[in-house]
Image: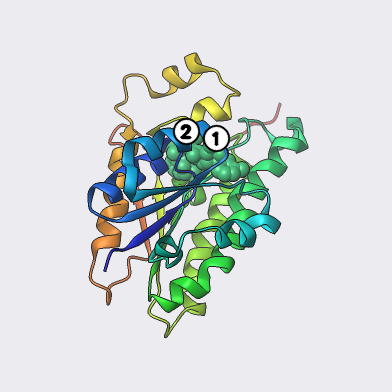
Amino acid sequence: MTRTVFITGATAGIGAAAARKFASEGWQVVGTGRRQERLDELTAELGDYFHPLALDMREPDLFAAALATLPDRYAGIDLLLNNAGLAPPMSNLQDAEQGPIDVAIDTNVTGLVALTRTLLPRLIERKGAIINLASVAATYPYRGGAVYAGTKAFVRQFSLGLRCDLAGNGVRVTSIDPGMVETEFTLVRTGGDQAASDALYAKMDPMTAEDIAGTIWWVASLPPHLNINAIELMPVNQSWAGFAVHRHE
Ligand code: NDP
Ligand code: 8X3
């Protein structure tokens, strides 16, 4: 039986690489995102293996109606890849604006939970799997990233908790927690500053979207009795800075 993966945020980065990987392995892919032109490009590239579904993760009230439009052959879901996400600009909270914070929480947390809940009956029916994109930021805090890290800590812990809820249903759940991956992530985080993105990833051999897609594929290919709870991965040239100590006058 042909299997189907539902990938949120298939229009760029890790999600697009995963869409290409799963399609190349013979899976059907439902790919979502807001940018219709990117969905059209993937449809042209992947053809019969790809079904585009324009979906904004911040509009959970529209999820059920969007899912109802899936053609019959795409309606059964074997794997949900909760990948869509973003970070608000790097900023101490005391200096940050509320708008981008709301966008990150609505996308990374509220939308992810709502979509997962909506798709769970289909995943349970197929004894499928859920792979959630958290981040090393879920575990290791850094200055200016409190909200992003908080959303990713939620995703990681939500993944573990969901395993408890799904016990006995045969549905596997994994949190994938990468460090630096060169995608559009930093371009989005900086409001479109390509030079800042290039500088961040310069001369440190970041991971690629294909590296993470390969890990996702490996997790998805394991035998059904085996659950990877969480995977943390980093570029060799990324490590930890240690504790910061503030000294008063
Ligand atoms: P990209 O910016 O390259 O891709 C993000 C994807 O998310 C796009 O397809 C975008 O689609 C989608 N997306 C964002 N907001 C929404 C929304 N409101 N509704 C629907 N789709 C949305 O980033 P990455 O590929 O790097 O990120 C993918 C995931 O991996 C994210 O969850 C990120 O937090 C996580 N991650 C990334 C790391 C990195 O260093 N790059 C490291 C660790 C984790 P569109 O704009 O078309 O809506
Ligand atoms: C983003 C990972 O290391 O760039 O999720 O903060 S990192």
**Dot 2 and dot 1 residues touching (CB under 8 Å):** yes
Q: Return the residue nearer the eye: 239 or 69.
A: 69
List x then y, in percent, for residue 140.
Answer: 48, 46
The part of the image, by quadrant, that contains residue 26 is: bottom left
The structure residue drawn at horizontal position 61% and vertical position 49%, both measured from the top left corner, is 57
**CA distance for labels 2 and 1:** 6 Å
Q: What numbered label is drawn on residue 201?
A: none
Amino acid residing under circle 1: Arg
Q: Tell me if 73 is positioned left or right of 33 in this view.
A: left
Query: Can you say whether 91 is above or below 7 in the image?
Result: above
In which quadrant of the rendered image does the N terminus lie? bottom left
Query: Can you say whether 51 is above or below 160 in the image?
Result: above
Is the CB of the residue bearing disc 2 within 8 angstroms of ligand 1?
A: yes
Judged from the image, the secondary structure of the residue bearing numbered disc 2 is helix
The structure residue drawn at horizontal position 73% and vertical position 32%, both measured from the top left corner, is 96
Disc 1 crowd, CA 10 A, few/some/many (<14, 14-19, 20+):
some
The part of the image, by quadrant, that contains residue 192 is: top right
List x then y, in percent, for residue 64.
Answer: 62, 62
Q: Tell me if 147 is positioned left or right of 24 in this view.
A: right
Q: Mark 2 points at which residue?
A: 38
Q: Which colour scheme is used?
A: rainbow
List x then y, in percent, for residue 223.
Answer: 23, 71
Which residue is the extreme one toward the bottom? 168
Q: Can residue 82 be seen in the rendering of this structure?
A: yes
The structure residue drawn at horizontal position 28% and vertical position 64%, both measured from the top left corner, is 2
Is the CB of the residue bearing disc 1 within 8 angstroms of ligand 1?
A: yes
Disc 2 crowd, CA 10 A, few/some/many (<14, 14-19, 20+):
some
Q: Name the residue under label 1.
A: 35
Amino acid residing under circle 2: Arg
